Image: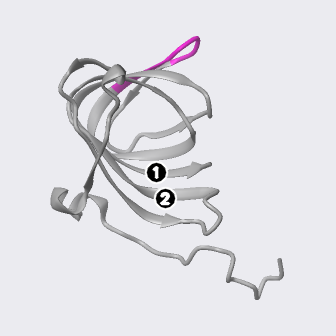
Amino acid sequence: MSTSDHSARPASFAVSLPDVPDAELEVEELDPAQIVSGDPVVTGKVLWEAEDGSQIRGIWQITPGVVTDTEADELFVVVSGRATIEVEGGATLEVGPGSACVLREGDKTTWTVHETLRKAYHINC
């Protein structure tokens, strides 16, 4: 790609994630089999998606509870809230405001959400 060809690249943008109202987030279905305890609710908003579906950027939020997941290739930054993320066969990550985290595709995780957690994420699909 030449340096003048920007059509395949996403536009630069900025958004203040703490200022996005909960009302702007859409409820995302959480498979009941993923819920270990509590009554967590997941909401989110896609801010950008590559035309070919290979990358997604957005906001994701989860209320307190314990859930399991199989991860995508993801980089995220926590905007608010706190959680403990246990990676099966790996590290236990304590995350809170300002934490940057990388999860590998296929990681099996258990999220213990202590305070409603909001993150900005980039996923490679």
Total marks in image? 2
For badge 1, the amino acid type reads Tyr
Distance (Cα) linking label 2 and label 1:
6 Å
Comes first in the chain, label 2 or label 1: 2
| Residue 76 shown left or right of residue 51 in the figure | left
Residues drawn in magenta: 84-91
Tell me the residue at 35%/20% (across/down): 33
Give the farthest residue toward the right: 2
User: Which residue is disc 2 drawn over?
Assistant: 57
Q: Which type of secondary structure does the marked residue at label 2 adopt?
A: strand
Tell whether label 1 touches label 2 (CB within 8 Å). Answer: yes
Q: Position of residue 39 (x, y in %)?
A: 17, 26
Q: Nearer the viewer, residue 101 or 89?
A: 89
For badge 2, the amino acid type reads Arg
Q: Nearer the viewer, residue 70 or 58?
A: 70
User: Which residue is disc 1 drawn over?
Assistant: 121
Query: Where is 60 relative to 10, above or below?
Result: above
Tell me the residue at 43%/47% (across/down): 77
